[in-house]
Amino acid sequence: MMKSHGKSQLSLVLVFVVAAGLIMSGAIAPDLALAGKAYHKIGPIHLYPHGRKYGRTYHKTGPVQLPAYDQTYGRLSGDWWQWLRSIPGDMLAPDGVSLGHPLIAQGKMDCSLNQPAGPVWFLAGTESGDATRSCVVPEEKALFFPLVNAVFYNAEGEDYTVAEKREALNDFLKLACRLDSTLDGTPTVYSLATVRIQSPPFLLETATPDIWGEDALVDPQAVADGFWVMVPPLDRGKHVLQFTGSVCDPDTGEPWFTVNVTYNLFVR
């Protein structure tokens, strides 16, 4: 993950949580249009601007939002960030010893932490590097996660506008690359859409202690951007969800940041 709360630092909270969707590996193509909304395509995957298509990537920023259960992808992406930052950074794992925050957990973890009411649960990736996790999820819950995502919020004394946040996020997410996800060994791109979308402005309030040390931070107009996947409720039993994502140098095409996460999910 990467964070950004001021253009001087580009404090984009980039969470390679490929938690995280599925898209084919490849660099993002230039904007096809950018005037309140932007459509992009990734490699050979084609754009379908009228809605979700299986095995395709739907990429949109701006006020138009793609529906998802009783929400939209855009609003869920903001909710995902609020969920992540609402969990205290010193939260312990089920073993009572190791840290259990979803961003840094390893091994057995509690995936129910601070999950919202409703049909969708969130999963997270890592700050960087590899993680292997196991947890229980209810059979009636869909799972929403990013392959690569970021959030822009104002820290104390900063006053970046929503438009400035959107522009910075859009520029940054163009560097996303090598994105992939599988469920039980099958690429999810075969059956699930990957959506890149920016959120409406949302209220971001961090916990104390915050996972990144920004205790009690508040921005009523934070903006999120990222590539997202929604996995429908799974059948009972064990499932393995794996995802990876990188940010690549625009000149060399080589990744300078990579996350690789495996979830062993026990659906009950």
Image (cartoon, grey):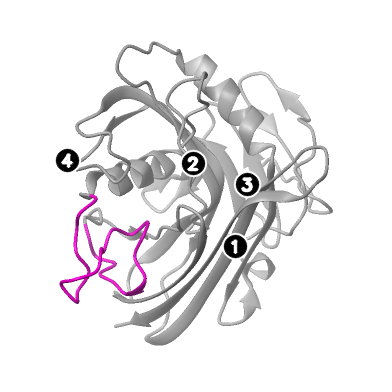
Q: Going by the image, does 222 lie left or right of 25?
A: left
The C terminus: image quadrant: bottom left
Residue to which mark 1 is pinned: 244
Which amino acid type is shown beneath numbered disc 1?
Thr
Element assignment for label 2: loop
* Mark before the other along the chain sequence, 2 or 4: 2
Q: Please, what secondary structure does the residue beneath circle 3 have?
A: loop
Q: Which residues are magenta?
A: 89-113
Task: Find numbered disc 4 in the image and state the secondary structure of the residue it sits on.
Answer: loop
Name the residue type under label 3: Gly
- Position of residue 218 measured from the top left corner of the image (x, y, whole percent): 25, 26
Which of these two is toward me, 59 or 83?
A: 83
Mark toward the viewer: 1 or 4: 4
Residue drawn 74% across and 58% down?
Answer: 25
Q: Which residue is mark 4?
A: 208
Mark 1 and mark 4 lie on one chain; the one further toward the N terminus is 4
Q: Residues within 10 Å of mark 2 (few under 14, many from 20)?
A: some
**Could you give the CA–CA distance between mark 2 and mark 4, rounded to whole angstroms?**
19 Å
The crowding category of the residue bearing disc 4, from other C-alpha atoms within 10 Å (few below 14, some 14 to 19, many at least 20), is some
**Which residue lies under the disc numbered 2?**
2
Give the image location of residue 115, x and y in percent: 25, 57
Q: Amino acid at mark 2?
A: Met
